[in-house]
Image (tube, rainbow, N blue to C red):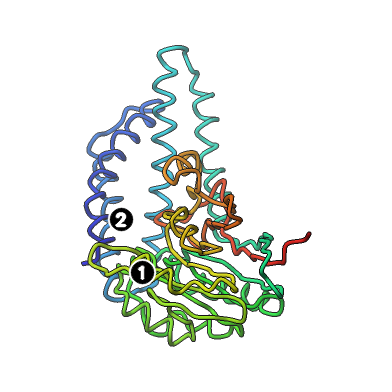
Amino acid sequence: MSFRTRRVLMGAPFYALISFFVLNYVLSYYTMVNIFQLLFLVLLLFCIQTLPMLFEEKKSTPIGRFFSKVSGIWQWLLVMLLIYSVVLFILSFIINIPVLIVSIILLTIPVIGIYSFFKAHRIVVKEKVLEFENLESEFNIVHLSDVHFGSIRHKKIIRDLSDKLCELSDSCDLVIISGDLADGSCVVEEDDFIELNRVDIPIIFTSGNHDYYPGLDCVHRACKKAGIVVLENSGISYDDINVYGLSFSFDNIDMPSRDELKSFVVDEKINIINYHIPNGWEELSDIGFNIQLSGHTHGGQFYPVVFFGNLMYEGHNMGLFRDSAGHYLHVTTGVGCMDFPMRWGTDSELVVLKLRKKKD
């Protein structure tokens, strides 16, 4: 049983408890709640959340993926209903809120939900310019992260990603994936990423935390079958570009020392470090890396979580950052979604980083 499965199973009773109290509170505005019927509904939602996941670890099926997506949508709705209920509860001590107003506000949740669902499934392309004094020729990199191939977003997200990358291949030189290509919610088969083999520019991948959950070896095999270059605490050079893939730092993984990282840096080149989480930028910049590429945060994925992202990641929740040395950190909001197939306030994005010589 993977770490992700254990995490979800441990959290499922908590979700069930919250579901019971939130549904009871909201429904009580309209009717006398039958506790036994409510308990049955909560138990049904609990089963929808947990049972498909146990089978998806062994073999992903359409029915398992359907219920996983239903569960993800419900969990998002539950978060929204919880916030709604807390606000309503507090306001009820101050003013008397008519049922009509309660209903109108309540109806905004499914409207936001429909918008968030479709927004999460639409990949947008953005462009950002990075300037360097020692760059001899222009170089375009497609940066992406957090595809989260799994039960909620399966082979279609790989096809959609491949289509977008094929469109960009004429104008770009390299694709870099900053981890979490897999989600861990289902098994990863050897041919699952094969659609990416259609992309005719090099693709580099370095693991994130979720790639370990279905088994990193499985993810690596699927990557190599698709022609993806896997960098795990190793590097590669393309013309004036040096790319080092720094693996996600679980406690049982030997990580390179500062001196080992320093030995990879070539002053005459643009040195890029691909690291899943947006941590350690100050130290990695000091070592000599001109660009750190990261993901992991999803930008918070949806409101109100977006507001807390900057607090969690020291202001580096999403976007492009530049320090006094002229070194960059780029944190992408990702392509896929974690747990909830919803986005509100963030994009499912591919970012074209246009490396250019600094103008005098």
Give the left or right position of residue 69, taking residue 108 as reference.
left
Which quadrant of the figure contains the N terminus? bottom left
Residue under the image location 43 percent in, 65 percent down: 148
Residue under the image location 49 percent in, 62 percent down: 336
Give the left or right position of residue 231, taking residue 303 as reference.
left
The percent coordinates of residue 172 (x first, y second) are 67, 75
The percent coordinates of residue 195 (x first, y second) are 52, 82
Q: From this viewpoint, which residue is outermost toward the right?
A: 360
Which quadrant of the figure contains the C terminus? bottom right
358, 68: nearer the viewer: 358
Give the left or right position of residue 96, taking residue 209 as reference.
right
Residue type at numbered disc 1: Asp
Residue under the image location 53 percent in, 36 percent down: 107
Residue under the image location 42 percent in, 55 percent down: 280
Give the left or right position of residue 108, taking residue 53 as reference.
right
Nearest to the eye among marks 1 and 2: give it. Answer: 1
Give the quarter of the image for residue 219: bottom left
Secondary structure state at the residue bearing disc 2: helix
Residue type at numbered disc 2: Gln
Distance from disc 1 to disc 2, alpha carbons, whole Å, reads: 21 Å
Residue 127, can we see it? Answer: no
The percent coordinates of residue 221 (x first, y second) are 37, 84
Please name the residue that numbered disc 1 is placed on. 211
Rendered image: mark on residue 152: none
Rendered image: mark on residue 49: 2
354 is higher (above) or lower (below) than 115: below
Residue 273, can we see it? Answer: yes
The percent coordinates of residue 342 (x first, y second) are 49, 52
> Which callout, 1 or 2, points at the residue further toward the start of the chain?
2
